[in-house]
């Protein structure tokens, strides 16, 4: 059987969206005659956005996982703010204070390409040892954190191997990139890292057509065949044997995951308020699974949606699936930022697996809108489409 070494910062018990893609890949690779080995970070040293012990069951017993030390500034940051976890990209920090702004500046200019860069040297040492010992000839590195890809650059100096770089998100084009107030030298260094990885990797995988376009634009003349698209997906086993259906007495609209200010779902809030007023006899509940930005919660309360609002803190993946299946409609919001057309969040595919109608707020000509339309799974509305909603 063929063997492959996978380097992934996010791994169970890490929770959140970042862990799903590679976890499910590893789960099913053995069925295709490929034996995966995983290098990741020690769970007690890691900076995870959340933890989810239920995901550990998806790791095949025969898969060997090697965990390393790391050095990261998030531990200090979280202690000062009194937080146990840090959202990816500070995504849910509304109206950041002076300390938060200073922290972003430090992160953007002294931790390049990201604040988990301290893990790269530990991952490299473990990968170096493992390749020497096991004679592995294929390495797959998934990011973000994009600093994980620096491991590939270091390994390339030592060995000849097939390097597959998997980009779940853009690098210097990520929607929150400008929040880190990079100075000129930092931007140049970050961009150089990105280009070096794109040139050096033998194969690049990403999640959507538009992200492929962004990556290809960094290296004019790059072979189009070098960059492949493998969208996110869902695991059928997560949805099997769950006899759960929507409550017929209540109309549940559910959103799971991150909802930051940049997602700008206001058009939906106001349209929903009109529907509630026009249908006083219908029990409508707007349910958020996760931690939506405080400013957005305040906005909903300001337009008198409090009685219809249900806020549920982050739950396990299994429980999240149950909430999807018990919903009437699922809400998806795409961040209102530059290059938003290529954002294909993993939750979209789990929404599809739940087989519930989807209301998407975002670019009507984006990749997510195309998939929803092709699957006849719902409809996408622009942010100026309140009457259409």
Image (cartoon, helix red, strand yellow):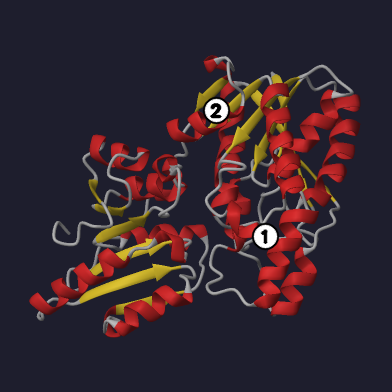
Instruction: Please tell me the numbered disc located at residue 217.
Output: 2
Q: Is residue 13 visible?
A: yes
Q: Residues within 10 Å of mark 2 (few under 14, many from 20)?
A: few
Instruction: Please tell me the numbered disc located at residue 48.
Output: 1
User: Looking at the figure, which quarter contains the N terminus?
Assistant: top right
Residue sitting farthest toward the front: 184
Q: Earlier in the sequence, mark 1 or mark 2?
A: 1
Q: Closer to the camera, 152 or 302?
A: 302
User: Looking at the figure, which quarter contains the C terminus?
Assistant: bottom left
Residue at 28% in and 48% down: 355
Marks counted in the figure total 2
Instruction: Please tell me the numbered disc located at residue 268.
Output: none
Q: Gap in Å between the C-alphas at discs 1 and 2?
A: 31 Å
**x and y, in percent, of residue 46 in the image:** 75, 58
**x and y, in percent, of residue 302 in the image:** 32, 84
Labelled pair 1, 2 in contact (Cβ < 8 Å)? no
Determine whether, in the image, residue 147 is placed left or right of residue 229.
right
Residue at 41% in and 60% down: 263
Residue 56 position (above or below residue 314): above
Secondary structure of residue under mark 2? helix
Residue at 42% in and 46% down: 340
**x and y, in percent, of residue 89 in the image:** 61, 58
Secondary structure of residue under mark 1? loop
Q: Which numbered mark, 1 or 2, is in the foreground of this view?
A: 2
Determine whether, in the image, residue 138 is placed left or right of residue 333.
right
């Amino acid at each position: 059987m063929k063997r492959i070494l996978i380097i992934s910062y996010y791994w169970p018990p890490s929770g959140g969206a970042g862990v799903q893609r590679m976890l499910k890949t590893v789960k099913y690779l053995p069925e295709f005659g490929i034996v995966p080995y995983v290098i990741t970070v020690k769970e007690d040293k890691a900076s995870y956005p959340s933890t989810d012990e239920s995901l550990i069951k998806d790791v095949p017993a025969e898969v060997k996982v090697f965990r390393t030390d790391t050095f990261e500034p998030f531990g200090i940051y979280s202690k000062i703010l009194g937080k146990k976890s840090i959202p990816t990209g500070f995504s849910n920090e509304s109206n950041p204070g002076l300390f938060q702004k200073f922290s972003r500046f430090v992160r953007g200019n002294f931790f390049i390409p990201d604040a988990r860069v301290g893990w790269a040297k530990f991952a490299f040492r473990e990968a170096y040892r493992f390749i020497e010992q096991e004679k592995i000839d294929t390495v797959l590195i998934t990011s973000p954190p994009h600093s994980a890809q620096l491991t590939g650059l270091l390994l390339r100096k030592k060995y000849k191997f097939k390097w597959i770089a998997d980009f779940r998100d853009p690098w210097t084009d990520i929607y929150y990139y400008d929040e880190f107030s990079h100075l000129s030298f930092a931007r140049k260094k970050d961009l150089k890292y990105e280009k070096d990885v794109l040139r050096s990797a033998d194969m690049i995988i990403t999640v959507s057509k538009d992200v492929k376009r962004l990556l290809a634009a960094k290296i004019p003349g790059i072979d189009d065949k070098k960059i492949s698209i493998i969208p996110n997906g869902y695991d059928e086993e997560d949805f099997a044997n769950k006899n759960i259906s929507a409550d017929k007495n209540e109309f549940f609209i559910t959103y799971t995951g991150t909802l930051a200010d940049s997602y700008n779902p206001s058009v939906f809030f106001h349209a929903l308020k009109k529907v509630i007023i026009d249908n006083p006899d219908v029990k409508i509940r707007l349910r958020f699974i996760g931690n939506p930005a405080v400013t957005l919660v305040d906005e909903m309360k300001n337009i008198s949606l409090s009685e219809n609002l249900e806020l549920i803190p982050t739950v396990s993946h299994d429980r999240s699936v149950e909430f999807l299946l018990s919903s009437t409609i699922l809400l998806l919001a795409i961040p209102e930022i530059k290059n938003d057309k290529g954002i294909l969040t993993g939750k979209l595919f789990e929404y599809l697996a739940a087989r519930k109608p989807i209301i998407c707020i975002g670019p009507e000509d984006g990749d997510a809108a195309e998939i929803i339309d092709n699957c006849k799974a719902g409809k996408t509305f622009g942010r100026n489409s309140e009457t259409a909603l």
